[in-house]
Image (cartoon, rainbow, N blue to C red):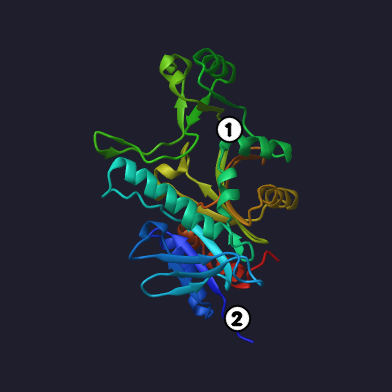
Amino acid sequence: MTDTRTVLVATEAMDVTADMVISELNRRGVPVVRFNPADIGEGLTVSARFGTCPVTPVAGQARTPSRTADLDSVRSVYWRRPVWPQFEHLDDADRRFAAAQTRYGLGGVLYALDGPLWVNQPLREAAAEYKPTQLATAQRLGLTIPPTLVTNEPDDAREFITTHGRVITKTLRWTPYEREGIPVTSWAEPVTADEIDDTIRVTPHLFQARVDKVADLRVIIVGDQLFAVRIDSGLLDWRKDYSALSYTVIDLPGPLEKTLHAYLDSFGLVSGSFDLTLDAEGGYHWLELNPTGQWGWLEETTGLPMAAAFAELLSRGDTR
């Protein structure tokens, strides 16, 4: 019998990676409803009923101008890169009120859908995005992590840098940032002890001993499938110049693959993008997890069937 249940895809308007997955779902004949929370209003409506149906705790519909999804007939949710509305046409008080009502109304309705497979469940994903928590989890699982300090104490930062010599600093979370109207991107950057002053007291900073690496790795896990790509560049932060990168599809040691799956399991996630480095002795150093990391360009350059893996997982609706 044909499965008519819907796959919900929540993401921003321009998301080529989501487009790739949706194209795969379309090829499989899987019903898809794509939406963005920022479109609430004319572009997105939701009506959810609770306590009215003995069979399901949540009944109702989510509608876009071209699609309708029955909330009690969703097989999976691809929570890709949704954007919440800002309500810029309202004054400050109304903007805050409307934003809160949308996040806890629309968001609450969606989070209440506990039957479908989530890739990934937003509340679990949010818990996994804290870098200090990531580092502690990686160490508990036996992964090798670079010595790291999170601090807003200048003396502690100077002591750490002096002790470890070559140290980098990077943001605890990527955040849109502008200086004089010009977007500024934060990379991993070298830092010296004499650069530390009292301005770091304003907020915690992350300092990390630099790994003497020979290459970087991007590892994508989709359910039970794992894709590993070696990235050679000679750059401290390979994201600075994609034209300088070369790629090699590799196999990871079995124990490392098992540990990365266990890492996702510890947060209740079914997918994620890991960044690791490889040293000259063949040792792997764990850096971070991005639950919604980019992978589309890797499929284009390596031919790895990542979009198909996502489509298979979402259409199946389970984590087998």
Q: Position of residue 217 (x, y in %)?
A: 57, 47
The residue lying at 70 percent from left, 39 percent from top is 143
The correct choice, above or below, for 108 with respect to 29 in the image is above
Q: Where is residue 254 in the image (x, y as percent from the top left)?
A: 74, 53
Q: Between residue 15 and residue 35, name the one nearer to us.
A: 35
The residue lying at 55 percent from left, 15 percent from top is 156
Work out which residue is located at the far left of the displayed protein and give it.
180
The residue lying at 64 percent from left, 65 percent from top is 115
> Which residue is tagged 2?
3
Q: Would you identify the image quadrant in which residue 180 lies?
A: top left
Q: Position of residue 98 (x, y in %)?
A: 38, 50
Q: Between residue 88 and residue 273, name the one nearer to us.
A: 88
> Which residue is tagged 1?
211
The correct choice, above or below, for 122 with respect to 66 in the image is above
Q: Between residue 60 and residue 254, name the one nearer to us.
A: 60
Which mark's residue is nearer the viewer, 2 or 1?
2
Numbered disc 1: secondary structure: loop
Amino acid residing under circle 1: Val
- Whichever of callouts 2 and 1 sits on the residue coming sooner in the sequence is 2
The correct choice, above or below, for 250 with respect to 183 in the image is below
Q: Is residue 59 left or right of residue 41?
A: right
Number of marks in the image? Answer: 2
In whole angstroms, how far apart are the C-alphas of marks 2 and 1? 49 Å
Characterize the local packing of mark 1: few (<14), some (14-19) or many (20 or more) Cα atoms within 10 angstroms: some
Quadrant location of the N terminus in the rendered image: bottom right
Amino acid residing under circle 2: Asp
Q: Would you identify the image quadrant in which residue 68 lies?
A: bottom left
Q: In this view, does 257 lie to the left or right of 19?
A: right
Characterize the local packing of mark 2: few (<14), some (14-19) or many (20 or more) Cα atoms within 10 angstroms: few
Task: Inspect this view and state whether residue 24 appears.
Answer: no
Quadrant location of the C terminus in the rendered image: bottom right
